[in-house]
Image (spheres, helix red, strand yellow):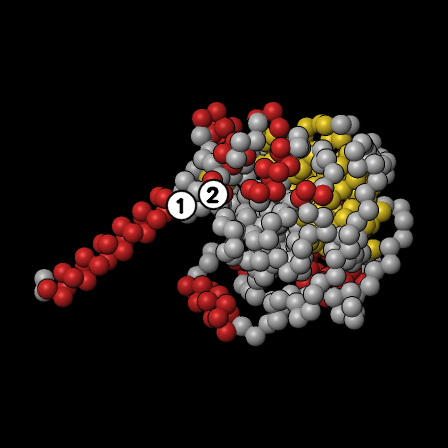
């Protein structure tokens, strides 16, 4: 081998060593979460969704080819979509009653941006996928940044009785938010395996419950059920699909809510509606989809979200997972425009609250196109 060849080989070896060393060091960073092992590993492996050493979707995801990866790269660098809002997003500061005691009766939902929703349901206060940090990232100051502040800061939240987590991606499972809520006594319902992350963040085991699909647990008179979705998981370089992903049914004595988290479209929505519906409210993701079938398999498009709402047999639809982070190759407001049009075509009661604006079951809601209305 020539001297130049030896130098090139040495450079490749050193680069590989640097990458491996960096990955090993990063694995100790708390935000990356924990490792599924011990008794938890046994529960994970016993799941019908766990096959060949990892969790899998019931309907396989379309394989991603090199052409699609090249298309992603080109769209990321050369895409002309307006992916961030050109003007500030309006945020309403919510008024919460009886902050020191039980939540009021009935059902009220407040969108906190992205997939984060605050719920008052039959006397309990709940949150779904709460992320109140500025960045959807393991590192402060790096990664996708919020377009708007949350309507309430963490310190201004009332006592949250229950949190449901759909999966462990950074835009759905936020270490800072989790640790703050845990310190106030919140109980977490999470898919199988995610307890490893919570334990890494010093959340006591008595404060979280891990569930497989179709498993249920009760708290405060409300039944929480993990239900199927089409997605994936992972927070680091070597933990792909090591933890499960779920949607959630939250059923109180008087009201029922469905929360999708992230999901591609599929027959699971009808199965959930037939088995656990109907619902007073469906909270369905509409954003961060495409291009390509591989991505759409795990991130349904707005028109599919409306179909999911109908299959779930829900009365009112709250579209989420848009308008907070730049995570996809479409215009920032394209998801809501398409969802509103599809909802109108299907005569769906689809509401479009501002961030922080309350939606109350059984009460009319005056939706406006605030994303285009002059502030």
Decide: is 273 above or below 4.
above
User: In terms of secondary structure, where does tag 2 sit?
Assistant: helix
Residue marked by disc 2? 32
| Residue at the far right in the pictured view | 363
Residue at 64% in and 60% down: 147
Residues under labels 2 and 1: Cα distance?
A: 8 Å
| Residue 269 image position (x, y, % from top left) | 69, 46
Query: For the residue carrying disc 1, how many other residues have a C-alpha within 10 Å: few (<14), some (14-19), or many (20+)?
Result: some
Residue marked by disc 1? 26
Quadrant (top left/top right/bottom left/bottom right) for the C terminus:
bottom right
Direction from residue 185 to residue 167 in the image, left or right:
left
| Residue 313 image position (x, y, % from top left) | 78, 46
Q: Quadrant of residue 254?
A: top right
Tell me if label 2 and label 1 are in contact, CB under 8 Å.
yes
Query: For the residue carrying disc 2, how many other residues have a C-alpha within 10 Å: few (<14), some (14-19), or many (20+)?
Result: many
Quadrant (top left/top right/bottom left/bottom right) for the N terminus:
bottom left
| Residue 44 image position (x, y, % from top left) | 51, 32
Residue at 68% in and 63% down: 335
| Residue at the far front in the pictured view | 155
| Residue at the far left in the pictured view | 2
């Amino acid at each position: 081998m020539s001297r130049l060849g030896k130098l090139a080989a040495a450079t490749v070896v050193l680069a590989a060593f640097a990458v491996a060393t960096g990955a090993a060091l990063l694995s100790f960073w708390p935000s990356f979460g924990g490792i599924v092992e011990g008794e938890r590993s046994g529960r994970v492996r016993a799941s019908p969704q766990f096959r060949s050493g990892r969790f899998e979707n019931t309907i396989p995801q379309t394989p991603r080819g090199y052409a699609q990866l090249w298309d992603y790269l080109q769209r990321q660098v050369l895409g002309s979509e307006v992916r961030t809002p050109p003007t500030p997003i309006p945020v309403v500061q919510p008024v919460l009653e009886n902050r020191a005691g039980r939540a009021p009766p009935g059902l009220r939902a407040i969108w906190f941006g992205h997939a984060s929703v605050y719920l008052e349901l039959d006397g309990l206060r709940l949150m779904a996928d709460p992320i109140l940090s500025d960045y959807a990232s393991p590192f402060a100051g790096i990664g996708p940044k919020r377009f708007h502040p949350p309507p309430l800061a963490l310190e201004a939240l009332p006592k949250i009785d229950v949190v449901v987590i759909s999966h462990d991606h950074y835009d759905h499972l936020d270490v800072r938010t989790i640790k703050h809520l845990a310190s106030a006594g919140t109980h977490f319902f999470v898919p199988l395996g995610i307890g490893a992350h919570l334990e890494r963040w010093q959340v006591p085991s008595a404060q979280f419950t891990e569930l497989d699909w179709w498993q249920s647990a009760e708290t405060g008179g409300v039944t929480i059920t993990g239900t199927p979705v089409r997605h994936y998981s992972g927070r680091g370089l070597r933990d792909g699909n090591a933890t499960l992903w779920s949607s959630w049914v939250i059923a109180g004595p008087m009201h029922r809510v469905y929360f999708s988290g992230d999901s591609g479209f599929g027959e699971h929505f009808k199965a959930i509606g037939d088995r656990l519906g109907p619902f007073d409210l469906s909270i369905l993701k509409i954003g961060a989809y495409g291009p390509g079938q591989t991505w759409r398999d795990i991130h349904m498009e707005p028109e599919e979200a409306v179909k999911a709402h109908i299959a779930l047999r829900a009365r009112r639809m709250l579209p989420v997972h848009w308008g907070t982070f730049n995570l996809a190759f479409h215009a920032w407001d394209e998801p809501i425009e398409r969802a509103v049009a599809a909802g109108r075509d299907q005569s769906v009661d689809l509401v479009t609250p501002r961030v922080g604006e309350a939606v109350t079951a059984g009460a009319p809601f005056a939706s406006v196109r605030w994303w285009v209305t002059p502030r």
